[in-house]
């Protein structure tokens, strides 16, 4: 076997999920070489295919392409008993199932963990939902903004006096996706040791709350509701954004030595020598005065110059970009964090989608983009053929509307 064989080469994943959290988890497994089959309903497919505002052409939005690469696609009607039986056959030959039905939905279709594991005891079955598989909210639908609000994340976010504020991006979905990805990977290692699979219960609510270990610890220590403080850390300072001559800069200091170097870079001896500012507790108590002096110093030069000065002094600092500026940064370019993929079915931009590349590197078996996102039903015939169905049987299923084949 070649040293460059992908980490998950030979592993089969059945992706029964929709929108972002489950599909992104399955995509990460595909980035590592797993054979991922995405199953969608005929006709419409995943709602993300036609997500309003980002559609490249009917049935292939840029966002769908960005979270469904490295998958083969089949279209099967799970509401039809024969379609559900086909899906169960796919699940029983898989190593991993990822689903995000409202809890109880997979069971009603005969595709729950019990049904799959009865014929495939080694299955790693990941259920990704809004609130978990059990409990008073289990059957509620849940999305990113709902989880942000109920986890406390929105309550922590915003300027003083402002209402709770939604954090940008699909934070809750991605938190759940990465959590499920890690849990699936660990469960596969466990299965390799024991031969046993298991059911993984991942929720957007728990995953998003799991992003907040430090605010939670501070809250239970102080017994006080954390205030919204804008672009600063309420428990550490300086650890915040400051205006400069031409923009803003983030600065984070963790200890007395860094504070001394920071003040020397600013050229402010009062800040450096005044005992009120020597320790973090004093700086928090006198934050307004400290900040005013820092802002006055930083107003003298542009952001890039301050970042260079702080870097020379081993001070953690960085510019604050608008999203359209991020991909011009030399470190972002060096890390190869942007990919461009030729995407069949996408009409905009010459049929090419720019998306985030796999976000980590591996020395021996790096993740890679091996195929674009599938058109709806693109691989239905191919995958059903692997189950042993011949062409006539597949055509019969298509004529009955139980499966759909991609247009030629």
Image (cartoon, rainbow, N blue to C red):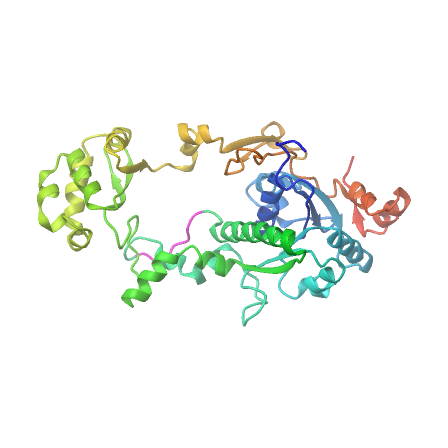
Q: Residue at x 29, y 68 (%)?
A: 223
136 or 55: nearer the eye?
136
Q: Residue furthest front?
A: 193
164 or 386: nearer the eye?
386
Q: Main secondary structure of the magenta part?
A: loop
Tell me if 242 is positioned left or right of 164 in this view: left
Residue 100 visible, this orientation:
yes
269 or 52: nearer the eye?
269
Which quadrant of the structure image shows residue 372? top right
Rendering coords of residue 291 (x, y %): 18, 45
Tell me if 291 is positioned left or right of 331 in this view: left
Residue 329 visible, this orientation:
no
Rendering coords of residue 17 (x, y %): 64, 52
Tell me if 83 is positioned left or right of 23 in this view: right
Q: Quadrant of the N terminus?
A: top right
Q: Which residues are magenta?
A: 162-168
Q: Residue at x 76, y 56 (%)?
A: 88
Above or below residue 210? Residue 4 is above
The stretch drawn in magenta includes residue 260: no
Rendering coords of residue 256 (x, y %): 19, 45
Q: Residue at x 64, y 51 (%)?
A: 192
Q: Residue furthest right?
A: 392
Q: Quadrant of the C terminus?
A: top right
Which quadrant of the structure image shows residue 210? bottom left
Q: How many marks?
A: 0
131 or 117: nearer the eye?
117
Above or below residue 164? Residue 43 is above
Rendering coords of residue 202 (x, y %): 55, 59
């Amino acid at each position: 076997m070649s040293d460059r064989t992908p980490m998950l080469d030979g592993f089969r994943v059945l992706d029964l999920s929709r929108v972002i959290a489950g599909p992104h988890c399955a995509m990460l497994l595909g980035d590592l070489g797993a054979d991922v089959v995405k199953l969608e309903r005929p006709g419409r497919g995943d709602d993300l295919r036609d997500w309003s505002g980002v559609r490249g052409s009917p049935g292939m939005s840029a966002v769908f392409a960005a979270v469904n690469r490295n998958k083969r696609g089949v279209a099967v009607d799970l509401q039809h008993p024969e379609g559900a039986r086909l899906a169960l056959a796919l699940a029983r030959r898989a190593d991993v199932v990822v689903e995000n039905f409202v809890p109880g939905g997979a069971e009603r279709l005969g595709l729950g963990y019990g049904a799959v594991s009865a014929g495939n005891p080694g299955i790693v079955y990941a259920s990704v939902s809004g609130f978990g598989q059990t409990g008073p909210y289990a059957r509620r639908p849940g999305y990113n903004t709902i989880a942000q609000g109920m986890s406390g994340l929105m309550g922590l976010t915003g300027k003083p006096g402002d209402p709770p504020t939604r954090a940008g991006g699909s934070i809750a979905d991605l938190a759940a996706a990465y959590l499920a990805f890690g849990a699936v990977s660990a469960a596969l290692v466990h299965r390799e040791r024991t031969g046993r699979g298991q059911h993984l219960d991942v929720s957007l609510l728990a995953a998003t709350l799991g992003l907040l270990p430090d605010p939670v610890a501070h809250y239970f220590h102080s017994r006080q509701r954390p205030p919204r403080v804008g672009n600063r850390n309420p428990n550490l300072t300086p650890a915040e954004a400051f205006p400069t001559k031409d923009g803003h800069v983030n600065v984070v200091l963790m200890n007395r030595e860094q504070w001394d170097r920071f003040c020397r870079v600013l050229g402010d001896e009062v800040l450096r020598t005044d005992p009120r500012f020597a320790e973090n507790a004093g700086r928090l108590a006198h934050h307004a005065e400290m900040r005013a002096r820092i802002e006055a110093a930083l107003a003298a030069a542009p952001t890039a110059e301050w970042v260079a000065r702080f870097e020379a002094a081993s001070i953690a600092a960085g510019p604050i970009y608008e999203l359209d500026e991020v991909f011009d940064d030399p470190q972002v370019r060096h890390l190869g964090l942007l990919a461009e993929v030729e995407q069949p079915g996408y009409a905009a931009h010459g049929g090419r989608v720019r998306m985030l590349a796999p976000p980590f590197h591996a020395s021996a078996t790096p993740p890679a983009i091996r195929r674009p996102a599938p058109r709806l039903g693109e691989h239905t015939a191919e995958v059903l053929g692997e189950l042993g169905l011949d062409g006539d049987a597949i055509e019969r299923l298509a004529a009955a509307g139980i499966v759909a084949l991609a247009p030629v």
